[in-house]
Image: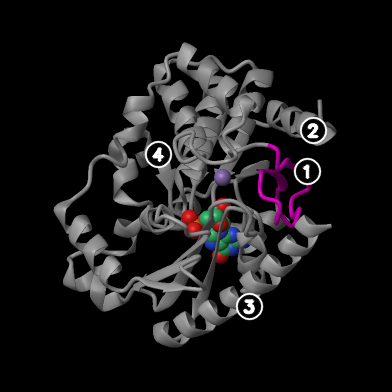
Amino acid sequence: MNREFLSIVAKLSESSNILVVGHIMPDGDDISSVLSAKIGLERLGKNVLAGIDWRIPWYFYEFEEVNQILTYEQVKERGFRPEVVLIVDASSPDRVGQFQEFFDSTTVLLMDHHATNTLFGDHNWVDTKFGSTAQMVVRVNNELGVPYDEKLATLNLMGIATDTGFFRYSNADETVFSDATKLVSLGGKVHLVSRIFENKRIEQFKLLSTMVDHLRLELDDKIVYSYLSKEDYENNNCNEDDSGGFVGELRSLRGVELAIFLSEYDSGEVHISFRSKDWFDCSKLATMLGGGGHPRAAGCTIKGDLYVIVEEVIREAKNLFLTSLTSLNDSASK
Ligand code: 5GP
Ligand code: MN
């Protein structure tokens, strides 16, 4: 087994007070990984707190365990002094938000599957072969001897299911299916996981319709993009959490290779999600714009005027798309 994996397992094993931390703008894999690690370590008798420095989208509260995830302020209020901080699914220190403050006083253990990871922990188990960080948690829990039941298996399964688009994306490889099978055999329930996304408010459908109104196509319909402004969210009685999954709808359009969705947050920042189908490297584009992610799913956040950002991002996307297309065609003709 990987040396960093073994170091992380050893550190967790010898520690009594552990803080498990996820990333800002948490997704299903992150929430699943935080909770599966937290609950697993607690089952070994450890004193564990879990924290995410961001609001958790309301639909994840289908799982009551999500209430166990504390804000940075709540962790501070408790005066918790962890010996180690276990960070899951975060590719760079800024992604953990204010929890960076713990880095100086503790040993930082990092588990992640992003190629853009900057290896900012004291021990970094980063492996891009995994479709989800949740699968890395399965391995740590197994090595530590954590007992699984239906609740833990379902929570852990959530990360694998959500990061692979419910087993549809190109990262849904054999290991994804064998890990999912194992969790299902331990009581994991896929239909309970899918309930997070099959629980929509009618306002979200109206918000989707606004997004479709703003939809534009570029470069022979190979690029699709759309956006939602703060006013769009307000007019539909929604906030930015309610548009989770919209970028996937854009990508589902026939013939599209790259989908871009820009969302103006309450804070005035604009979050941009990139998704591709077959070949375009979204993480390259996101990294150029100060973010990161995976080849087929990446993102970044930019401060400024939404409409100026839309123009800039689409210009950058078109440029990189055309140069990437040229090198793709060149290598195909060789
Ligand atoms: P999403 O578009 O769903 O927000 O993010 C897609 C992927 O890109 C996820 O793997 C996420 O972790 C990553 N990502 C999104 N935004 C950022 C960002 O601002 N910085 C970095 N490093 N990664 C991001
Ligand atoms: Mn992930």
| Residue 127 highlighted magenta (yes or no) | yes
Q: Which of marks 4 and 2 precedes in the sequence?
A: 2
Q: Is residue 32 left or right of residue 55?
A: right
Q: Are marks 3 and 2 in contact (CB under 8 Å)?
A: no
The residue lying furthest to the front in this view is 333
Q: Residue at x 31, y 74 (%)?
A: 214
Q: Which of marks 1 and 4 precedes in the sequence?
A: 4
Question: What residue is pinned by disc 4?
Answer: 68
Q: Residues within 10 Å of mark 4 (few under 14, many from 20)?
A: few
The numbered mark at residue 36 is none
**Amino acid at pointer 1:** His
Q: Which of marks 2 and 1 precedes in the sequence?
A: 2
Q: Are marks 3 and 1 in contact (CB under 8 Å)?
A: no
Q: Is mark 4 within 8 Å of ligand 2?
A: no
Q: Residues within 10 Å of mark 2 (few under 14, many from 20)?
A: some
Q: Residue at x 61, y 31 (%)?
A: 173
Magenta region: 106-129
User: In this rendering, which labeled residue sits more in front, label 4 or label 1?
Assistant: 1
- The relative height of residue 152 versus residue 70 in the rendered view (above or below) is above
Q: Kindly report the distance in space between the C-alpha atoms of the residues bearing marks 3 and 2.
A: 43 Å
Q: Kindly report the distance in space between the C-alpha atoms of the residues bearing marks 2 and 4.
A: 27 Å
The numbered mark at residue 7 is 2
> Where does the image place residue 205, in percent across and percent down from the top left?
20, 56
The numbered mark at residue 319 is 3
Q: Kindly report the distance in space between the C-alpha atoms of the residues bearing marks 3 and 4.
A: 44 Å
Q: Are marks 1 and 2 in contact (CB under 8 Å)?
A: yes
Q: Which of marks 1 and 3 precedes in the sequence?
A: 1
Q: Secondary structure at mark 1?
A: strand
**Amino acid at pointer 4:** Gln
Q: Residue at x 53, y 78 (%)?
A: 313
